[in-house]
Amino acid sequence: QVQVVESGGGVVQPGGSLRLSCVASGSIFSIYRMDWYRQAPGEQRELVATITSTGSTNYADSVEGRFTISRDSAKNSVHLQMNSLKPEDTAVYYCTVHTVRQFGGTEDYWGQGTQVTVSS
C-alpha cells in the first residue's frame, strides 16, 4: 500500500507565497510522474503542474510563471512553490503519484488534499 500526504497549505494575502509538499511512502517500486491538482468550491478538479521522472515539467496556463514544481526522487517527494498568489488560486490542492508496479502495470495514488486560501 502507498500513502500520499500533502502539507504546507494555509491562509495567505494576495501577492504572497506558499510552498506545498507531498511525500509518498509505502510499497513503491518506481514513480514515473507526480502531479498537483486543485479544486475550488463548485469547480472541477484542475491539473496545476506535473513533473516526470526525468524532470520534465508542465503547468496550467493560469499558474505559468508563478508556480514552480520540483521533486526529490530520493525522498519520493514533490513540492509546489507558489508565488504571486491570487484569490482565484484558493482551492484544495491534491498531490497525485503515478507509479509503475514491479511486475507490470501502473497505479495512481492521491493524497487527502491541503487547503490554500488567498484572501486579504
Image (cartoon, rainbow, N blue to C red):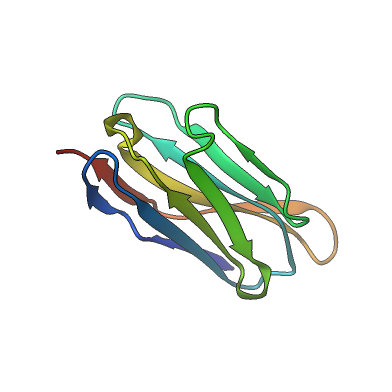
Q: Quadrant of residue 74?
A: bottom right
Relative to 72, say whether 117 is above or below.
above
Q: Position of residue 116 (x, y in %)?
A: 30, 46
In this picture, residue 97 sits left or right of residue 89? right
Judging depth in this view, the residue of 109 and 57 nearest the camera is 57
In this picture, residue 27 sits left or right of residue 62? right
Residue in the image at 62% along x and 44% along y = 50
Which image quadrant: the C terminus?
Answer: top left
Residue in the image at 61% along x and 61% along y = 71
Q: Quadrant of residue 27?
A: bottom right
Q: Quadrant of residue 8?
A: bottom left
In this picture, residue 77 sits left or right of residue 80? right
Judging depth in this view, the residue of 6 and 88 nearest the camera is 88
Relative to 54, say whether 35 is above or below.
above
Q: Position of residue 17 (x, y in %)?
A: 34, 50
In this picture, residue 89 sits left or right of residue 23? left
Residue in the image at 21% along x and 43% along y = 13
Residue furthest to the right:
103
